[in-house]
Amino acid sequence: MGLRRARVTWLRKHFIGIHPRDGEMIAAVHEGPLSGLLEEHAGGWDDETMFGDGDVLVPREEFKDLIIGLPEFETLPIFWARWNAIGKPTEFVVKCFETEDELAIDTQGFDYARYKSAIQWV
């Protein structure tokens, strides 16, 4: 298994707007990759991390849910199955197989996401 280095800026669960529905509305009108919302909000890169080869591939609807609010993983059936299949890593990459968009997630050892980030590969 190879390692890939990337720059990230970890953001908490709800970062768009005051209410979770704000994120839904913003994502609906956002043009381009949804991970761009994370990158725009972060305003730069503040950390580097290493990711293994095991990426979690999900449909756009599940990817959007992860970008907007990081729901409980069990509520995303395709994500849940694929994350379990690669051994539930703590830090990992999620890719949308419909758009080729991607984001990083850090669970910090929990069974749910604590942080998310856009990715700049180094």
Image (cartoon, grey):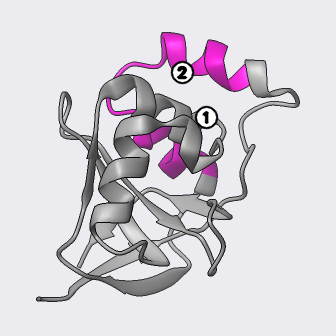
Q: Residues within 10 Å of mark 2 (few under 14, many from 20)?
A: many
Which residue matches tag 1?
68
The answer to whether residue 84 is above or below residue 98 is: below
Q: Secondary structure at mark 1?
A: helix
The answer to whether residue 19 is above or below residue 90 is: above
The residue positioned farthest toward the left in the image shown:
1
Q: What residue is at 60 percent from the left and 56 percent from the top? A: 42
- Amino acid type, mark 2: Ala
The answer to whether residue 117 is above or below residue 95 is: below
Q: Are marks 1 and 2 in contact (CB under 8 Å)?
A: yes
Q: Nearer the viewer, residue 73 or 93?
A: 73
Q: Quadrant of the N terminus?
A: bottom left
Q: CA distance from mark 1 to mark 2?
A: 8 Å
Residue 27 image label: 2
Magenta portion: prevailing SS class = helix
Q: Which residues are magenta?
A: 22-41
Q: Nearer the viewer, residue 69 or 87?
A: 87
